[in-house]
Image (cartoon, rainbow, N blue to C red):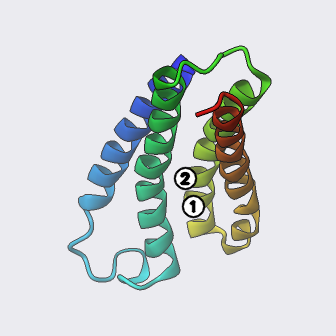
Amino acid sequence: MAINLVFAWWLILAGLVSGTAQGLFFHREDWLGGYGSWRRRMTRLGHIAFFGTGLINLVAAATVRLWALPTDSMLVRASSLLVIVGAMAMSTICYLAAWKKPVRHLFFIPVASLLTGVACLLTALLRAGV
């Protein structure tokens, strides 16, 4: 799960960079169609998703280390992979959906990945007697 720790910090950096880039234009009321527009809401969600999924990866890595879960366990390895896939897909789909609305139908990919990844980690914790 060391990869999740490193990946988490990359996601946090991406959140800071994307927020900075978007922040250059936030003062313009008409930017991306206005404050309540689909495009502007989706780009804000994509920016925040970097932080949220980064924290999920950070906490997952810390949990494995804190509870000394076996990193060669199928559940722990699946959890690691799934929360990374979910993180990569969440912001990507947010930004793509901002430009092509039908992409929103792909949100099941990050949601299912993150839900399954967290469920795998919880199952590994329960099996370890935590």
Q: Residue at x 41, y 65 (%)?
A: 44
The residue that mark 2 highlights is 91
- For residue 125, side relative to residue 20 (left or right): right
Circle 1: element type: helix
Residue 14, above or below 25:
above
Residue 37 image position (x, y, % from top left):
46, 83
**In the image, which disc is placed on residue 94?**
1
Residue sitting nearer the eye, 21 or 80: 80
Residue placed farthest to the right in the image? 74
- For residue 23, side relative to residue 11 (left or right): left
Residue 73, above or below 26:
above
Determine if residue 69 is in view. Answer: yes
Mark 1 touches mark 2? (CB < 8 Å): yes
Q: Residue at x 52, y 25 (%)?
A: 67
Residue sitting nearer the eye, 103 or 4: 4
Gap in angstroms between the C-alphas marked 1 and 2: 5 Å
- For residue 47, side relative to residue 16 (left or right): right
Residue 28 sits in which quadrant?
Answer: bottom left
Q: Quadrant of the C terminus?
A: top right
Residue 60 image position (x, y, % from top left):
53, 35
Q: Give neighbour class at mark 1: few <14, some 14-19, many 20+ (Cα, 10 Å).
A: many
Residue 7 image position (x, y, % from top left):
49, 29
Tag 1: amino acid: Cys
Determine if residue 85 is in view. Answer: no
Q: Quadrant of the N terminus?
A: top right
Q: Residue at x 50, y 73 (%)?
A: 39
Residue sitting nearer the eye, 90 or 67: 67
